[in-house]
Image (tube, grey):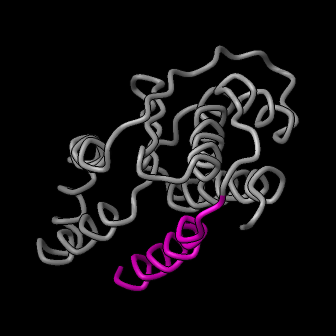
């Protein structure tokens, strides 16, 4: 179990490392433009409505992440013990920059990010929205749920990285 958490932790850390670099956008893009770009990148033919995007403070993002993942926290406590569950939650809370909430279809992104990086995180979270719309919710009780969650996260990170490369010139 600990090995699985460490693999996920390392993967998320690598994904979040992109957030360390501050890029500046030449031209800000609207959420609708970012959404159209993500749809094109994912080569989707279906038409889904634009999700609501809210830019929030770090504290609000952390509060929402903690509340939304309360059930996962209970599961971690049961599976790994309370100390490890707290370490896992603290890790995620320290690194969260964006969040897609499937129940509401809402995308939340931190206001503390540089403009273009914020747009890239919006693209990442919109990818998760489109994954849900196209492929549905992942049942965490299935044998391959962890693999499917990881694949979705990798695809979202690929979208984010592509956005940074295309639209966020380095200083």
Image-quadrant location for residue 125: top right
Q: Is residue 52 left or right of residue 128?
A: left
Please state if 40 lies on the left or on the right of 153 as rendered.
right
Q: Is residue 67 magenta?
A: no
Give the image location of residue 139, x and y in percent. Answer: 47, 42
User: Which residue corresponds to the image point at 48% horizontal and 73% vertical from the top-left?
Assistant: 8
Q: Residue at x 50, y 69 (%)?
A: 12
Judge from the rendering whether residue 40 lies leftward or rightward of residue 5; answer left or right: right
Q: Quadrant of the N terminus?
A: bottom left
From this viewpoint, is residue 12 visible? yes
Instruction: Please name the residue shown 23% across and 69% down the image.
Output: 79
Which of the 4 image quarters holds residue 122? Answer: top right
Counting from the top left corner in percent of width and height, residue 109 is at: 46, 42
Residue farthest along the left direction in this orientation: 82
Residue 25 position in % (x across, y down): 70, 48
Is the residue 103 above or below the residue 150 in the image? Answer: above
Judge whether 144 appears above or below 131 on screen. below
Which residue occupies the foreground of this view, 82 or 91? 91
Q: Is residue 10 magenta?
A: yes
Q: Is residue 169 positioned above or below 55 on the image?
A: below
| Residue positioned most to the bottom | 3
Residue range in magenta is 1-23
Give the image location of residue 95, x and y in percent.
39, 64
Q: Examine the image and state in which quarter residue 119 appears.
A: top right
């Amino acid at each position: 179990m600990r090995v699985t958490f460490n693999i996920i932790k390392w993967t998320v850390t690598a994904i979040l490392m992109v957030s360390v670099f501050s890029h500046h956008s030449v031209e800000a893009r609207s959420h609708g433009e970012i959404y159209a770009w993500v749809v094109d990148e994912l080569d989707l033919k279906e038409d889904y409505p634009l999700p609501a995007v809210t830019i929030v403070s770090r504290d609000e993002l952390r509060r929402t992440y903690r509340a939304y993942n309360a059930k996962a926290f209970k599961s971690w406590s049961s599976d790994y013990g309370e100390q490890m569950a707290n370490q896992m939650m603290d890790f995620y809370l320290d690194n969260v920059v964006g969040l897609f909430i499937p129940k509401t279809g809402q995308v939340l992104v931190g206001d503390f990010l540089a403009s273009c990086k914020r747009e890239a995180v919006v693209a990442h979270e919109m990818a998760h929205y489109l994954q849900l719309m196209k492929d549905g919710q992942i049942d965490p009780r299935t044998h391959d749920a962890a693999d499917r969650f990881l694949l979705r996260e990798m695809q979202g990170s690929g979208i984010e990285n592509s956005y940074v490369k295309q639209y966020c010139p380095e200083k």
